[in-house]
Amino acid sequence: MTRSPLLLAAVTVAAVISAPLASAAPPPLVPLGTAPALPSGATADSSALPAELTVAVALKPRDQAGAERFVAATADPNSPDYHHFLSAAEYTERFGPTPAAVDQVSKYLSGSGLRVTEVTGNRQVITATGTPDQVGHAFSTALSGFRATSGERFFNATKGVSLPADLAGVVRGVTGLTDRAAAHRAGSPAGPGGPGGGYTPAQLRTAYSMTGLSGSYDGSGETVGLTEFDTFKQSDIDAWTKYFNQPSVTPQVVKVDGGFPSPSSNQLEVTLDVQAVAATAPKAAQIVYSAPNTDEAWVHEMAKIASDNKITVLSNSWLLGEKCEADPIPSSHDSYTQLAAQGVTMLSASGDWGATGCGYNGDNSTIQADYPPSDPLFTGVGGTQLRTSDSAGTWQSESCWNQGGSGNTRSGGAYSQIYAKPDWQPGSNKYRSVPDVSLVADYGAGALSVYMNGGWQDVGGTSLSSPLWAGYVAMLNQKSLAGGKSRLGQLNQSIYKIAGSADYPSTFHDVTSGGNGTYDAGTGYDLCTGWGSPKADALGAKLTGGDTPPPAKDFTLSAAPSSGTVEAGKSVSTTITATSATAAAQPSVVGGSPTTTAAHPFIVSMRREGSAFPGQQSCTATLFGPRTVLLAAHCLLEKPGHKWFVYGADDLTKDTGTTAEIASQWVHPDYTDWSAGADIAVVTLDRDMPVPAGTTYPKLATDTSLDAPGTKGLTIGWGQTAANTYSNVLRQAEVPIQADSACKGRFTDPQGQEEYKTPAMLCTGYPDHHAAACVGDSGGPYLVGNTVVGVFSWMSTQCDWNAVYARVSTYAADIAPHLPDGPNPPQTGAITLSAAGLPSGATASFSPSSVDLGGKSTLTITTGADTPAGTYQVTVSGKGPKSTQTTTYSLTVTGGTPSELTLTNPGNQTSRSGQPVTLPLKASGGSTPYKWSASALPGGLSIDASTGVISGTPRGFDNKQVTVTVTDSAGKKATASFYWFVF
């Protein structure tokens, strides 16, 4: 009895609300996309239209260009942001949609009759529910029910989405306008039954030369995320790990939009992914993100993964054709950008339909890549047929995967129709090409033995290739973190750099036979297998060491003076100085903290036959040229046995690096024994070491200015970290110079004389001896900035005392003739200078244009007569071999012509009657102070003439076209017009 009056009241209110709007011009609409494609032959079926449906409204980042630049910088070894990743909260606050945008869209949805049910944590996706009519009205579309020729019943929008212009500026797209399956799995077809029909985890690790890595690492501490549109049985995972005697794996399941209560028709895909990750990273944690297979759920799932920020590696085996399922792509890319900024490595199956990415949708003729492997943020993984030569799994050959036919039996590979070719990718085509790499996929010849529903299947497809790679990356992350470095993040830039170098044959199996029906495999990169499959141990060594992040501050820039004032049309100058910034170590043990030869490319290891050290390490030495080595004389003369040098091997237990023999040697003529002093020698190698281009070699200390007690320098070496405790890796420590007296009085030579002698020796260390060089560091440098001040000679064999170096300044005149460029290497101009943030009409020049560490350059800024008056922050950048550093110069220009007065249009506004409003307007240019005015404001609102802030409480329902005007002190004006709706 009470329902009728309530219903009547609601209808009456609706009539009152709509009456004023009927007389006003509707706000302009902006189309956001086309309607989801209908399958051929679909017919109308009204019963397929639900009473209520859910849509996902994806918002644009507040600063998409800035986010893209930051993500690119995290993958650039020359950027100060290299591998400096953000948390989810940091990304959201810096780049994500604003709270105001969320509020604006939410109010619009609610005002259209929809119920807002969720906003993702990163503010990217707003989920709302309503009737088909409400959804259609909100997005200026219409929805109808259909029946496909297969009998499938579904609903679909019949026209594209449009939104008012102010909303269109913040909305990326709308999904949920169809309930047809959006994603197709790359494919996990089954071959012969039983474990013998597929490869075992151990065989795959052997085939891809992964045993060295997997012998030390297992993915512990890493979390691999899996995008899924079904679920799995834990009992299947338990049976698989038990059979192969592997650690148990219990993936966490995160249900998105309800997920799946129990396994369905795509159970095999999820089961394969979980077991494949465990095959290469048995102790990595796994999170299965499970969602219904709709475009709305796809968008929501990707935003959820990014917002949760719980994973370190993402593997995807579900794909969208770039042309036939395009709606979720722009919103998904926003989520992937956030994941990249958070340091997540993303991998995706390249697809199983060859070069026809929409083949699953019946289009076997249009050449296109699948998404997301076509996104440059992803490493696309193609498929191969693997042949092994024995039961252990020894690699014999590989070819591009193609099991014939026109179905999902071929390695996916083609050019993107969306993304331009990144600068790191080779080729003349203007579009991004897929795949990047590959791995086993051919289930006919043997893929992976998978256990599901009580039985074994040989399962493959690129759905296998991607999670196998994901597990591999989890191990590499673990290794990198153990070495004191960061996780790998985006892989493509590093992969293409390695594959494009002389390291290619040692790091990849180049797959040169077979094809995917459109493109053939060939020498080097191809659109069937990318660069090929990994020689995992060797490639891993390069990925975790070759592109090691540079020190955060290997040098600094400064401007003196740091500010200046100039009249328009004239010039002003400042001096830019590049100063070495010695990286601080963690002086917690004698051996300091791990470092790499990439961070110190002038360090080389000397090996000696019979040495007890790992890898027969004997001494550490310093390169003063590609084949010139400075070290201690006792390294060459004290002990017998064959001696040689290895360059680029950070870990002594790995058989890596470039080997060179001794061609000739010079030993200081006064050397008789390390205790007598003159412990100095120079070796010439029989070949050049592969020192990176642009490397600045150290200088030789020629005077005592850097020898003063209290001066801090860096000691580097592979020596012991404590008595009889060996280090496998290169280490560094920051250590001060001590007064000579600190090293006297403890040891005497065989003649009973004081062992520490001046000025032959240099005393270094801490009073508590918590950090210093020790046995095995012999010959290594003591560096102050870029200058070798000492060559390590001796200390207590218990590693509990100061370290004594040969004082280089004492012997510099004797050493210099044996170095290629004397005591000081030639100026290479290794740091290139540039300036940004200049006002219009101004130019910057540097003299010289590049400097070395310690060098100076004069920056001259020349303004034009029309350069606008004002103060500008000019950013001066110095790009060095290992990093880019910046400093700021504050430039004030006086007397110039003021820039043009502009007023930023705030866009259409929507408010609720009785709720307070504040809208600050923004102007720039012209001359201050500004005066503000506005016409046709809704009742209850006013503008502050001095600040340009519109505020107040709107009264009643209204629809106005507002015009605001700003006037500068010279009387120039700028205007902006927009609609203001009050409900």
Image (tube, helix red, strand yellow):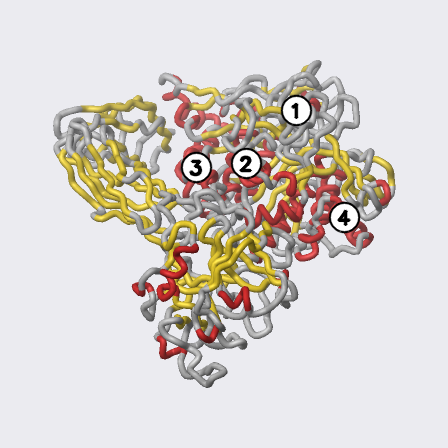
Q: Nearer the viewer, mark 1 or mark 4?
A: 4
Q: Are marks 2 and 4 in contact (CB under 8 Å)?
A: no
Element type at marker 2? loop
Q: Residues within 10 Å of mark 1 (few under 14, many from 20)?
A: many
**Which of the two labelled residues, at mark 1 and mark 3, occupies the earlier sequence position?**
3
Measured in 3D between alpha carbons, the distance from the residue under mark 2 to the one under mark 1, in whole angstroms, is 19 Å
- The residue to which callout 2 is attached is 377
Three-letter residue code for mark 1: Gly
Element type at marker 3? helix
**Which of the two labelled residues, at mark 3 and mark 4, occupies the earlier sequence position?**
3
Nearer to me, 647 or 16: 647
Disc number at residue 201?
4
Measured in 3D between alpha carbons, the distance from the residue under mark 3 to the one under mark 4, in whole angstroms, is 39 Å
Question: Residue 164, image x and y in percent?
Answer: 42, 23
**Which of the two labelled residues, at mark 3 and mark 2, occupies the earlier sequence position?**
3
Element type at marker 4? helix
- The residue to which callout 3 is attached is 69
- The residue to which callout 1 is attached is 357
